[in-house]
Image (cartoon, helix red, strand yellow):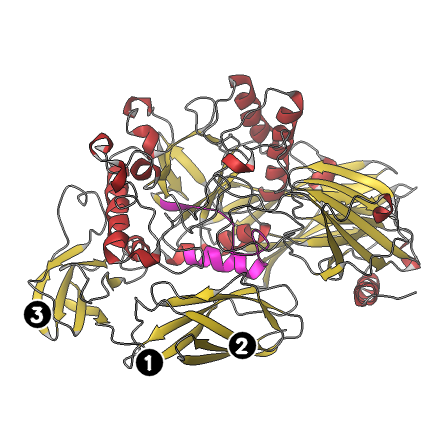
Amino acid sequence: MKISFFSILLFLVLLSSCADGERAGKLSFNDDWRFMIQDDSVMQNSAFFQSDFDDSSWENVCLPHTAKLEPLTVNDQWQGSCWYRKSFFVPEIYDEKEIWIEFEAAMNHSLIWINGIEVSENNGGYLPVVVDATDFIIPGKENVVTVRLNNEDNPVTGPKPLTILDFNMYGGLYRNAWLIVKNKVHISHPVLEQKEAGGGIFITTPVVDEKQSVVNVKTHIKNNSDSIQSVKIVQELLLDGNLILEQTSKNDLLVKPGEDIENLQTIKVDNARLWSPDSPKLYNLKTKVLIDQVVVDSQDTRFGIRSFEFKGNELYINGEKTFLRGVNRHQEYPFVGYALSDNAQYRDAWKIKEAGYDYVRLSHYPHSPAFMDACDELGLVSIDAILGWQYYLDSDAFREYCYRSARDLVYRDRNHASVLAWEVSLNETQMPRFFMQELHDIVHRQYPGENTYTAGWKNEVYDIYFQARQHRIKHYDSIQIKPYVVSEYGDWEYFSMNAGLNQHEYGKELRYELSSRQKRGFGESRLLQQVENVQEAHNDNLNTPAFADGYWVMYDYNRGYDDEIEHSGIMDIFRLPKFSTYFFKSQRDIIKDTTLFIASYWNNDSPLDVKVFSNCDEVALYLNDELIEKRKPDSDSISYNLKHPPFTFSIDEFSPGELKAKGYIEDQLITEHVVKTPEDPVSLKLWVDKSNKEPEAGCNDLLFLYIAGVDENGTIVPDFTEKIDLLLDGDAEIMNVGKVQAEAGIATALVRIGKTGGSISLAAKSEKGLNGAVDFLVTK
């Protein structure tokens, strides 16, 4: 019998865990899967799920995995059924263990077999699917888990059918999978238990104060042994890796066979370090379960000590009044759909924070646990959502699916410091009141007490009212004195009814020119139109009682109902910035980050009114070392509410050369930015987008590598649009489907890192013979 590398690793990891106090083990279950798409040529075979089925002809894949690579512009996204199979060996010594398999996501309807026995059927593609495999695993033998997925339109889960959907729901086991081994006495899994306000470890912070905070820890213990057990629970609290206190349950806890207990421990934390967008300090809680001084289970939980409080409609974080400037995000990458690595999730969050945002709305479904972790680390306040978009089905099955989604969302994310509210609402959907009330009540039952808020796009039932700006324009009177968020703005009000707030005055021919849906390659004037829309809309939002607003959208994305990519992102689908990125970045306080950016290529086609985005007090602009003007920020009808309005400089005529901006604070020069007129391209410049996270082997990591046509000064040439040939050397793979072609001077290769690490080289050659290369190291 062939034993896989995973099986050997499993044995070694769990053997070491056994030697260290019989603790539970959690092992990545991502490697060595077999995969097949079930199409017309491969009809469903009842033998696929049998343990002795020969899957050697199937593709060998690792998770996260997308069922089908798609072209850059997804006109006809694949829908259908696919199969995954994995063999793994479990040592005989684990005959008395509990074994669970957890899939972080499985799109969208799943059937799971273990050793030929069906053990799970699940609807929903965004929340964990957890299987108790204990009774189906055969220790001492090779075991087989089989997963059949179907991502076709599903009336039970919604939302709208793909052909009329404003985003895409891709396929596959597109997040991580885990094999979890527990002793008979163990900390439970909340999704398996479905215990109201319980299961697993549940941390709350009822008292938040820098002098002394109070942390409540509820631990749920199960005893699946055949005898009564006396257990102790030890809580170790760590900050920055250092143990700051330890607390043991006051008395031995007696758990009868086949029963469970919940234990609440209250921990007082002196000199508490509080979590906030500006200072996202995180604690780690190590929970240990002991029997006769032997650790039988342990679990690490990261959390933050913080409070979210509303006074009227104003938000206070740890007692400090806060406005949250934010953005909406879809989790899609080009070509691979939803199958992002954890590191790629982090890089997405890092870009959002770097762009000047402190809040992200997770549109319109639960995002990855890795993205939630990144929000915690980076100080991005989030509003967590169940799946929902313009779809409600009057059926018990649909409602129960939504109710279960709300429960599982809270179970999964309740210990994340970044979660401000739970959007248990079907976005832009007419819903009956009883349905909304039950979703709202589920959240408050699952997370009782303060610091718990629901959010919804209907101004009833929910704690926080979500309203898009396009809806507000005609309904100002619908804003009531309750916490209020501008959920979306800057796109639809300019696109769907042509442009501006006087939309009826514009003809259809201006729909794109005056909208916010602008490709990087459309040129400066169109990119500046997006900025003007963004500026006008954000300025208008600041007239309302909103405590937060969220621009639509962070990254360009595909959608089912349209054959074009939706281009309203402040970055394109390759995560390359448009001018609007720097507008938002300039809205940060100068003490947090200094921004100075000239929004011009300064060539023959450039507007002579030059926009500069900065959070400085004054900016001086020079053309070829001659001062144009030193001035204060703009003061006009679309600027007066902004923290840092742009600076507009008028230049009489174009003269090639150098634009230089100098930023001043209280008459002191703080920073400079230079733009040079691009000349003919002479070479290719390549760089790797690491976004504060080094590339990593062995986890299906994904990286964007950028290839720019540059002139002899190193200036990117914006009209460089050549096709690029690429040669990759090292343990990595180019994931692009179709040609690699530059847009606005830059082409992008999406590269997936392999398992071994080491040096990676990418050489590029344009169709007219320009060359360039980049080397980088990948850690193992």
In the image, residue 765 sits, relative to residue 159, either above or below, namely: below
Marked residue nearer the N-terminal end (2 or 3)? 3
Q: On the picture, is 264 further left or further right than 388?
A: right
Q: Amino acid at mark 1?
A: Val
Q: On the picture, is 256 further left or further right than 584?
A: right
Q: Amino acid at mark 3?
A: Leu
Contact between labelled residues 1 and 3, with CB atoms less than 8 Å apart: no
Which secondary structure lies at badge 1?
loop
User: Which residue is identified by label 2?
Assistant: 727
Marked residue nearer the N-terminal end (2 or 1)? 1
Q: Position of residue 733 (x, y in %)?
A: 60, 69
The segment highlighted magenta reads 325-351
Marks 2 and 1, how far apart at CA:
20 Å
Is 337 included in the stretch rendered in magenta?
yes
Q: On the picture, is 747 further left or further right than 30?
A: left
Quarter of the image containing the C terminus?
bottom right
Q: Amino acid at mark 2?
A: Leu
User: Which residue is identified by label 1?
Assistant: 682
Categorize mark 2 by other alpha carbons within 10 Å: few (<14), some (14-19), many (20+): few
Which secondary structure lies at badge 3?
strand
Numbered mark located on residue 627 in the image: 3
Residue farthest to the left, as pictured? 652
Is 173 included in the stretch rendered in magenta?
no
